[in-house]
Amino acid sequence: MNMHQYYPVDIVNGPGTRCTLFVSGCVHECPGCYNKSTWRVNSGVAFTRKMEDRIISDLNDTRIRRQGLSLSGGDPLHPQNVADILHLVQRVRAECPGKDIWMWTGYKMDELNAAQREVVELINVLVDGKFVQDLKDPALIWRGSSNQVVHYLR
Ligand code: SF4
């Protein structure tokens, strides 16, 4: 997997103070996408074990308390990202007790394959669906257009 950006302290992508990772790769090509530079899977830089370790350590940092991890992009559920994202969320679950995981994807919940669902079973909140410019509403919280749904899973 490749990534574009990591914010160790973020207060805009999800509730509370969070760590946020923007990964590379998206097949959805939504007109008006806010993050077009992330579409190619080989854009950005490699997501390394060192980066993964840093996220775990930041989530457990008691000096700046984080509520959890936000995963966005690009699309964390792009088929090429699923294995690395699964490994990351499994580690967060095992090594960061009490931290929540939010994820943004262009897929709809009901079109996820088995591998993507395995990831979703480990997260707390999934914001799903493509961004639709005609349904854009700046008043919406955690989503860009009204077709997208915030699924509070657990
Ligand atoms: S799903 Fe998100 S990142 Fe992908 S094209 Fe649509 S708005 Fe852009």
Image (tube, helix red, strand yellow):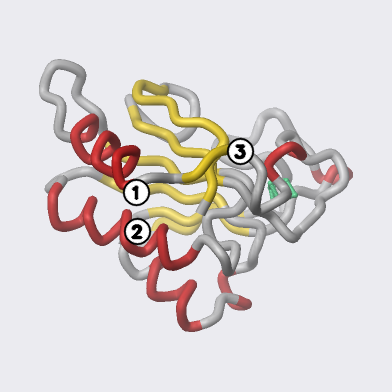
Q: Are marks 3 and 2 in contact (CB under 8 Å)?
A: no
For the residue labelled by badge 1, is the local secondary structure a helix, a strand or a loop? strand
Between 19 and 14, the one nearer to me in the picture: 19
User: Residue 101 got which mark?
Assistant: 1
Residue beneath the point at 19% across and 24% down: 65
Q: Picture quarter containing residue 109?
A: bottom right
Q: Position of residue 72 (x, y in %)?
A: 53, 44
Label 3 sits on a secondary structure element that is loop
Which residue is at 52% across, 60% downward?
81
**In the drawing, what numbered circle is on residue 44?**
3
Please, is residue 90 above or below residue 145 in the view?
Answer: below
Q: Which residue is mark 2?
A: 123
Local SS, label 2: loop
Q: Is residue 9 left or right of residue 73?
A: left
* Label 3 vs 1, first from the N-terminus: 3
Q: Does the beta carbon of the residue at mark 2 sit less than 8 Å from ligand 1?
A: no
Could you tell me residue 23's position as x and y percent? 54, 45
